[in-house]
Amino acid sequence: MFDRRGRVIPILALAAAGCLWGTGFFFGKIHGGPTRVDAPFVFPDRYYPIERFVAKGALILRPNYRGSEGYGEKFRSLNVRNLGIGDYADVISGVDSLIAKGYVDKDRVGAMGRSQGGYISAYITTFSDRFKAVSVGAGISNWSTYYVNTDITPFTRQYLHATPWDDPEIYWKTSPISNLSKARTPTLIQHGENDRRVPIPDAYELRQALEDRGIPVKMVVYKGFGHGINKPKQQRAVMEENEKWFAQYIWGEKPVEPKPPEPKKDEKKSAAAVNP
């Protein structure tokens, strides 16, 4: 796949055997880092029910956007002072390439990711109206907010080559919040309560901004967790939230409200005694 300047952008795609190209649903699953990389094999995901999406006919795009490791120093440095802007362009190039080849339906597209992938997903929320739903996991919405709260402040200076006081413009234009007026996409926000890497003020800022614009948004805070959700029960809860969100906005399924648990026999007797 090539970006708009003719550079090769590596992408991986997953689909079920027998998938009918051109009629399927599409998801961009965006890795974190930004210097991580998606490899060409299937592995269990802790946050997104990838296999269940594929079983329902979805094609999963996993782009190794500029800044990913494994493709040389020059490629890894392409998002310096270009965070979000270039990354987003690479994801969109992947989407355009697959649509042009007739692999997916352009009207049934979603995006999801955590950490840096959550940041790019937030960028998609505010910079594109082509996606039907987005899930932002532990993502950055405003680099200035991030800079004064994170436990790795040097990371921001490394990539943006400035502080927000020296160059507020670069911090603003690389922040998803800067393009809020164009936001249209229903967005799920998931964040650990005690996240020090991407502190939760970024999540609250994005949620409030989308609410103020009347954009469908749901925020789920995972109590007691940091940047990663590292216990199986809560990981399942994260997955289930993502599955419900995309089922509603991509597959058009009505959300099912959980039924309250049936009272035990002893509880029924107690209630009868109180209300004879």
Image (tube, rainbow, N blue to C red):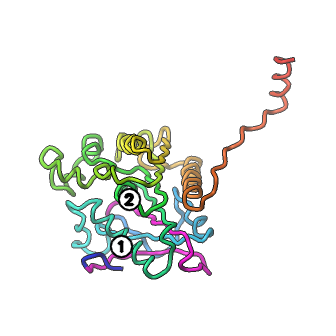
**11 or 266, which is in the foreground?**
11
- Quadrant location of residue 151? top left
Looking at the rendered structure, the kind of residue marked 2 is Ile
**Residue 257, image x and y in percent?**
66, 44
Task: Say which mark, if any, is on residue 124.
Answer: 2
Height in image: 270 above or below 105? above
- Residue 134 lies, in percent from the top left, at 46, 56
Q: Does the magenta stretch include residue 29?
A: yes
Kind of residue at badge 1:
Ser
Between the C-alphas of marks 1 and 2, the distance is 13 Å
Q: Nearer the viewer, residue 127 or 239?
A: 127
Q: Which mark is residue 185?
A: none
Magenta stretch, residue numbers: 6-35
Left/right placement of residue 246 relative to residue 39 reads: right
Residue under label 1, please give it.
93
Mark 1: secondary structure: helix
In what element is the residue under mark 2? helix
Image position, residue 268 (x, y; %): 83, 28
- Left or right: where 144 falls relative to 132: left
Q: Tell me which residue sits at (53%, 59%) in the image.
A: 48
Q: In this view, does 221 lie to the left or right of 35?
A: right
- Vertical order, 233 against 48 (above or below): above
194 in relation to 128, above or below: above
